[in-house]
Image (cartoon, rainbow, N blue to C red):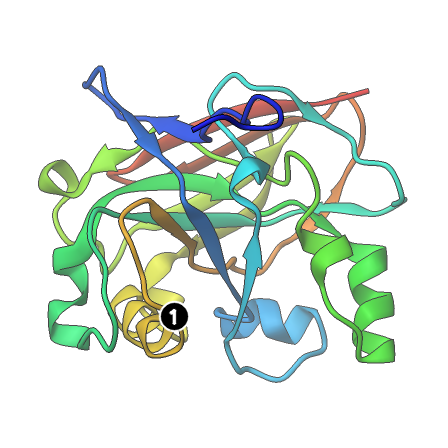
Amino acid sequence: MTYLFEPADVPALPIAGRAELFPVRRIFCVGKNYAAHAAEMGSDVKAVFFMKPADAIVPPGGPVPYPPGTNNLHHEVELVAALASGGRDISKDAALDHVFGYAVGVDLTRRDLQAEARESGGPWEASKSFDASAPCSALRPAADTGALSSAAIKLSVNDQMRQDADIADMVLPLPAIIAQLSALFTLAPGDVIFTGTPAGVGPLSPGDKVHASIDRVGALDFAIER
């Protein structure tokens, strides 16, 4: 097959301890999945789904520029689950069988644009789905971590702790997320899921250094480029 121009490279994440790369097909995200975060945003506690393009992924060491069009860029640390298989109408009991591994992700958000969208009832794409909006650590295989129902999740900026919680606080735990997503979409290998952020989100400026971690999963470090 001949293309009109060269297709883009496949977005991918490294896998801890392995030479293969994990190809990213789609990025599903869960909003308002921690009650304390929903409260700090002045929102009701009801998890919602949205998406980012696959090429929003920034693997470890990749550049994370301060995006245009905003004066209020926020960090949101999240547990990320990467699927090795999928399907429709997956049961909660079988959901974790589809997970290849886990990573530490940061859902970068143009908070000012999100507030405008919320006020007008408009979509979230401009606030959530911009270039380099999904920095992510290497994947840790689920065979190494075991099932993750509880783990400390933290994020600091310039060595100052901002977010400090436990993934056990999620409104929808991962099996329920996968089950509900699979009722709406046919999930597939390569899909990754950002599962929501705890309270403590806040602004980032050019030059800020971010450190995020989840127990048994790993850590992610990046700086916001000027």
Circle 1 residues within 10 Å: few <14, some 14–19, many ≥20: few
Relative placement, left or right, of 27 versus 132 is left
* Count of marks placed on residues: 1
Q: Nearer the viewer, residue 168 or 10?
A: 10
Q: Residue at x 17, y 77 (%)?
A: 91
Q: In the rendered view, tell whether residue 51 sits above or below residue 130.
A: below
Quadrant containing the N terminus is: top left
Q: Secondary structure at mark 1?
A: loop
- Please identify the quadrant where the C terminus is shown: top right
Would residue 146 be found to the left or right of residue 140 on screen?
left
Residue 114 quadrant: bottom right
Q: Which percent across, then down, holds residue 163?
A: 55, 49
**In the image, what residue type sits under mark 1?**
Phe
Q: Seen from this angle, which residue lies furthest front? A: 1
From the viewer's perspective, is residue 185 above or below residue 211? below
The residue that disc 1 covers is 185
**In the image, is residue 134 above or below residue 202?**
above
Q: In this rendering, would 112 be left or right of 44?
A: right
130 vs 225, nearest the viewer: 130
Residue at left offset 21%, top offset 46%: 84
Name the quadrant containing residue 98. bottom left
User: Which residue appears at 68% of the width and 37% of the height?
Assistant: 131
Q: Position of residue 124 (x, y in %)?
A: 71, 64
Residue 137 in the image: x percent, y percent? 41, 30
Left or right: 51, with 112 as reference point: left
Percent across and percent down for residue 47 are: 50, 76
Q: Is residue 53 above or below residue 22?
A: below
Residue lying at 84% horizontally and 58% vertically, measured from the top left:
113
